[in-house]
Amino acid sequence: MTSNLGDPRFFARSGPHSLASVTAAAEGSSQATERQFSGVAALHVAGRGDVSFLDNRRYLPALAQTDAGAVLIHPDLADQVPKHAVPILTTSVYGAWARVAALFHPLPLREGGIDLLASVHPTAIIDPTASIGAFVSIGAHAEIGARCCIDPGAVIGDGVVLGPDCRVGAQASISHARLGARVHVCPGARIGQEGFSFARTTQGFLSIPHLGQVLVEDDVEIGANTTIDRGSSRDTRIGAGTRIDNLVQIAHNVQLGRYCVIVAQVGISGSTTVEDFVQVGGQVGMAGHLTIGKGAQIGAQAGVIADVPPQARMLGSPAQPASIFFRQVATLKRLVGRK
């Protein structure tokens, strides 16, 4: 038996796969056996034909009860795996799970071609292996690279460049932008629109022309309904390998480094620089013209109004070092307890 995870109505399937193939995909090690597996599932719903995983000791009770046929697990916990299950040993369990899940559920392959209901400007350059869905609009002089997949209703503006293997979700819009290879833009995202920038005059507000663009480097993921404004006085840039969640706002001129993680509902104001490997929790707000140092971690709902040093851990509003924040919380609890 296997679980119903990865419903074939929605997800491509492959397999069954041998234990050797699963172990190779996991980049792990396991005992030699001829067993076959048909899918992946969480510990509590997995069947004997499924591969599961344990990456957190709090789920050891679920491991003891699982019916999974194989479990991806750290060598230190291998003796906790039930006798009926094969332990697949790896020191990077979650990475192994990602690779094994992709083995059983690869991205669907789409044949190249342009839907008859798409609107493509005659000067646009479309690689013949690209897949262009219904009601997609592609503007003048746009360039769509090899094996790109653009879902129905997306709008690709004049001059936009998509590198190879990009995916653009339904109803997303991209203008004034150049994307590298393997960029994934989720449905409803907005990239390249004019930012929120204006001059105050005695006659009222005067919009400032935004003459920059958005440069998105390789292997970036941009979540659903996220917005990335083009630059005004310089380009907005998103560094390679960065992951941006849904409902994030990135303003004009922002420089976002490589391999950053930006969680949902974060707002980054104009001209702020976020260096490489920064992690930002949900609903964080950042003022403009700041520098967030390499490797900094900013906790959820923090309000950042000053530069953040490299490797700092910040919490609270206004944001402050985590050690100070927790001392303040402890002090407040003691004061309240005295009343």
Image: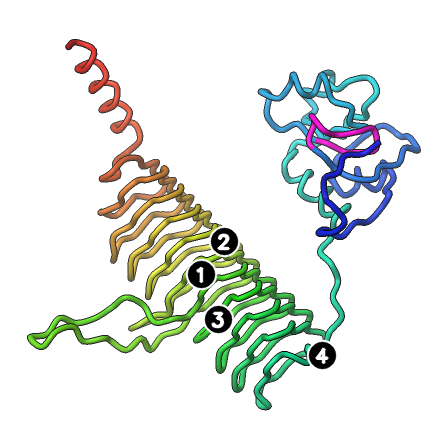
Residue under label 3: 174
Q: Secondary structure at mark 2?
A: loop
Q: Which residue was labeled with disc 1?
A: 238
In the image: residue 252, left or right of residue 147: left
- Is residue 56 placed above or below 207 in the rendered structure? above
CB atoms of marks 2 and 1 within 8 Å: yes
Give me the C-alpha separation between circle 4 and circle 2: 28 Å
At horizontal 37% and vertical 49% (from top left) the residue drawn is 266
Q: Nearer the viewer, residue 293 or 122?
A: 122
Q: Please report the residue visible at 57 percent of the width from the left and 87 percent of the height from the top.
A: 121
Residue corresponding to mark 4: 128
Please rate how many residues cluster around mark 4, counting C-alpha atoms within 10 Å: few if below 14, some from 14 to 19, many from 20. some
**Which segment is the magenta one?**
42-52
Q: Residues within 10 Å of mark 2 (few under 14, many from 20)?
A: many
Q: Which quarter shows the N terminus?
A: top right
- Of circles 2 and 3, which is in front? 3
Which residue is denoted by mark 2 in the rendering? 242
Rounded to the nearest angstrom, the CA distance separating label 4 from label 3 is 21 Å
Q: Nearer the viewer, mark 1 or mark 4?
A: 4
Q: Secondary structure at mark 3?
A: strand
Amino acid carrying mark 4 in the image: Pro
* Residue shown at the point (33%, 78%) measured from the top left: 211
